[in-house]
Amino acid sequence: MLEITNLHARLKDGREILKGIDLSVAAGEVHAIMGPNGSGKSTLAAVLAGRDGYEITEGGVAYQGRDLLDMPADERAREGVFLAFQYPVEIPGVNNMYFLRAALNAARRHRGEPELDAGQFLRGVRAKLKLLEISEDLMQRAVNVGFSGGEKKRNEIFQMAMLEPKLAILDETDSGLDIDALRLVARGVNGLRAPDRAIVMITHYQRLLDYVEPDRVHVLQGGRIVESGDKGLAAELERRGYGAVGDAA
Amino acid sequence: MTTLATFPVKPETRPYLDAFAGAAGEPEWLAARREEGLARFAELGFPSRRSENWRYLDLRGLEAHPLLPSVMGQPMGIPNGLALDDNAARLVLVDGCFSAVLSATAALPSGVWLGSTRQAIAERPGLVRAALGGVHQSFAALNAAFFADGFVLDLAPGAALDRPIEIVHLASGAADASLHTRSLIRLGAGARATVLEIFAGPRGDDGRYWRNDVAVWQLADGAALTRVALVEESAAAVHLGEVAATLGAGATLDGFVALFGGGTVRHEASVTLAGHGAQCRIDGAFLVSGTEEANIVTAIDHAATGGTTGELVKGVAAGRGHGAFQGRIVVREGAQQTDARQTSRNLILGRRASIDTKPELEILADDVRCAHGASVGELDEAALFYLRARGIPTEEARRILVEGFLAEPVEGIADPAIREHLLRRLSQRLARLEDVA
């Protein structure tokens, strides 16, 4: 599904953030990428989603056999790549439902499918809202405007559930969530686990991994993956902290 | 015209003076007003860009190529989707003249009079005479000399309309001409009305016409007027609209202008809050692309105590378009407890578009609350990336953000049918917008 090879990326100011990432995620797998602040976690997510402001100096990313970095951000999304934002953006004046329908129809057009009519769309929305316990009123408001932190994160997972991506990247989706919201988000993510879908969870803490069990855990530090293991590694990190990882590796 | 010989005549007014013939069969008072108007126009000439109220508008094209008044009587229908589905009455003017065929004004309740200005001159001369008084600025003076028709809405004290009155000003674009219309809205004490005025011309580059629309609104104590103007003129058209409103004690004016199309479009509203506790809201939105120009000019005069003014005007310029907002609020000495707020927010798409904004407060009273703010910016890159990260193609994402930006003031329109209509027209306008990038 996703094949990252020796990926180097730097900011426009020349600072190198990713210093040779190798990562392979197969369909059906859930991977967790953990690491301290400033290790390059969010940069990796941004580069995969196609955000401007980064320069790839070496290496590459293959997604379903295609060169991911060659595709504009919107095309990546239509091809099934989804990024759950660490800081979901507020968009005044743009209604949530309108936005979501535009996104769904863009993907459907891309696949050569007919656009959804209002009834089909609404039925889909209601089922998924219920799963994440999001009130329908929230959907009639502007995108993320006036949402609490938890509501914003749940809205990300709701969008993910609606768009049914092939590769989902969750950037610190657990940060700032109370335990109830965390459970709801985890329920949403678990509901999306499927043999034809890969999920990459980027997180600072082990918390989310108690609810969404990963197949593989990687430690990102100084722009490189310094250690990989099974879910047991997350628990170990929780005990000994990130400081010891580099030494162990 | 011997009366004109005593005035210095500005050269750009000459073609209009030569075209003036007066209208046969009109009452003497009206003929006199027309001549006064013409003389004043000859004296003033075109407003110069040195004049503060006109500094952002380029009228050289109009000055170089005069567009003379002409009555065309071109038969035409209302384009699909332009007007509301449901209204209390509809009055249609084609090329500035009343069209009985397209109008439907029969079903109005008692206490409500709606008709063409010509009909009002015959049936309610006193009313029209009052509306033609006062000292005119240059184009209003020209309008007094040449107006062909317009509409008059007169509500008796306490009369109220639930559904909107719709006024549709169509331009055929059949010939190069200027269309001068003069209208009046008078609401008696406690009367309430909602008026949607639509100004439209043929799509595309046909129709080099100049619409010069002048209106007077008189709101007696406790009256409430909502007036929404939707301007979708032709790409080569000039539209100059001028409104002068007077509000009695406790009267409420809720005004909205949507400038969504036209080569050169300017809308000026001058509002005098003459009675205690009058309330005025003037919101607006403009969208220019290609080489279009749009100006929203407001002058609010707080002449009495306890008045409130709220203004939210949002503008978007794309292509080589240019937009401007000039808002002036004056709080006169003694107009205590005035509360005035003014906000101008603007968005520029691309490097060749530009927007000027000039909010202005002149406060001569000491116990007041006044605030204003203005900004000009570009599309929010973070929001754009968010939409693209959900698969929405860049151009569509930009349109969605522009629509969201301009929808905010439109959402404030209280009448649901008019609000939905404007949102629909905005969305259709954006779908045609080519230079969104």
Image (cartoon, rainbow, N blue to C red):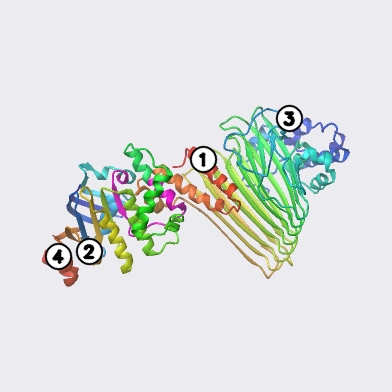
Residue B153: mark in rendering: none
Question: What amino acid is at disc 4?
Answer: Gly
Count of number-bearing discs: 4
In the rendered image, residue B272, in percent from the top left (x then y), is placed at: 72, 56
Q: Nearer the viewer, mark 3 or mark 2?
A: 2
Q: Which residue is mark 2?
A: A209
Task: Give the Cα separation between the discs numbered 4 and 1.
Answer: 56 Å
In the rendered image, residue A44, in percent from the top left (x then y), is placed at: 25, 55
Chain ID for label 2? A
Q: Which residue is mark 1?
A: B428
Whether labels 2 and 1 share one chain: no
Chain ID for label 3? B
Q: Is residue A169 above or below residue B168?
A: below
Task: Give the Cα separation between the discs numbered 2 and 1.
Answer: 47 Å
Binning the other alpha carbons within 10 Å of mark 4 as few (below 14), some (14 to 19) or many (20 upward) gives: few
In the rendered image, residue B50, in percent from the top left (x then y), is placed at: 67, 47
Whether labels 4 and 3 share one chain: no
Secondary structure at badge 3 equals: loop
Does B55 appear in magenta?
no
Q: Which residues are magenta?
A: A76-103
